[in-house]
Image: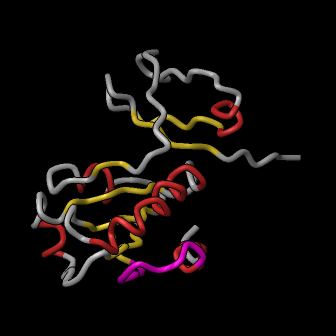
C-alpha cells in the first residue's frame, strides 16, 4: 500500500541542489534543510522573479509546470491580476511553479515567445509553452487551464 505525498521542490541557495519537501512538513512549520549540504532551505510561497538571465534554470529546466506572468509596472490590468497570481503561488506550491517576469526589464524572453500584449500568462511544461492566457482573466479560468498540465 503506497501513500502519495504532495511535495514542493525547493532549490538550495547554498549548493543549488533541488530538494523534495513534503507539503505537510511545511504546513507544520518545520524548517527544511538541504539533503546535500544540510543548510536551511528558504521556502517561498510568493511568485518567483524570473529574468532573461535565470529563465533557463528556473523555467526550462524545472521539473514541474510553470505559470509565468509577463507584466509591467505601468500596466493596470497587470496590477489587477497580481493578487490572483500571489494566491495561486501559495495554493499551488509544490504542484506548479508560479513566476513573474517584468517585460520592461527583460525584453528577450517576451520577444522569444512573441508576447504582444500584457498581462500574458504562459503555461510551460518541460520548458515549452503548452498554453497562453492573454488579459486579466478570472482565477477560475487560470485554474481550468492549469488543470490540463498538473
Q: Is 139 in the magenta?
A: yes
Could you tell me which residue is drawn at 17 percent across and 67 percent down?
Answer: 109
Residue 31 location, quadrant: top right
Quarter of the picture containing the C terminus is bottom right
Q: Residue furthest right?
A: 1
Residue toward you, 138 or 37: 138
Q: Which quadrant holds residue 16?
A: top left
In this rendering, position of residue 35 left or right of residue 99: right
Residue 122 coordinates in the image, percent (x, y): 36, 73
Q: Position of residue 129 (x, y in %)?
A: 35, 76
Q: Where residue 88 appears, x then y in whole percent? A: 53, 59
Q: Is residue 18 left or right of residue 33?
A: left
Q: Is residue 24 among the parts visible in the rendering?
A: yes
Figure check: 121 above or below 27: below
In the picture, measured across the screen, residue 18 lies left or right of residue 105, that is right
1, 109: nearer the viewer: 109
> What colour-coding does the image apply?
secondary structure
Pick the front one: 126 or 87:
87
Give the magenta part as a residue range: 130-140
Q: Is residue 127 inside the magenta stretch?
A: no
Counting every numbered tag in the picture gives 0
Q: In percent of the image, x 68 and y 34: which residue is there?
A: 27
Task: Answer whether residue 132 is visible to the viewer in this image.
Answer: no
Query: Residue shown at 64%/25% (left/top)?
Result: 29
Residue 78 falls in image quadrant: bottom left
Residue 18 spot, x, y in % from top left: 43, 37
Q: Is residue 49 above or below residue 34?
A: below
Image position of 9 with respect to 87: above or below: above
Residue at x-position 60% and y-position 73%:
147
Amino acid at each position: 500500500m503506497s501513500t502519495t505525498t504532495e511535495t514542493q521542490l525547493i532549490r538550495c541557495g547554498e549548493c543549488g541542489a533541488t530538494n523534495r519537501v513534503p507539503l505537510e512538513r511545511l504546513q507544520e512549520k518545520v524548517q527544511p534543510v538541504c539533503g546535500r549540504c544540510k543548510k536551511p532551505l528558504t521556502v517561498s510561497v510568493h511568485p518567483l522573479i524570473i529574468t532573461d538571465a535565470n529563465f533557463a534554470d528556473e523555467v526550462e529546466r524545472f521539473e514541474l509546470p510553470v505559470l509565468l506572468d509577463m507584466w509591467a509596472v505601468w500596466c493596470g490590468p497587470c496590477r489587477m491580476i497580481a493578487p490572483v497570481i500571489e494566491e495561486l503561488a501559495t495554493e499551488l506550491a509544490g504542484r506548479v511553479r508560479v513566476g513573474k517576469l517584468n517585460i520592461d526589464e527583460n525584453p528577450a524572453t517576451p520577444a522569444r515567445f512573441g508576447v504582444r500584449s500584457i498581462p500574458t500568462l504562459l503555461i510551460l511544461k518541460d520548458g515549452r509553452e503548452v498554453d497562453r492566457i492573454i488579459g486579466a482573466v478570472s482565477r477560475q479560468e487560470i485554474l481550468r487551464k492549469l488543470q490540463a498540465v498538473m
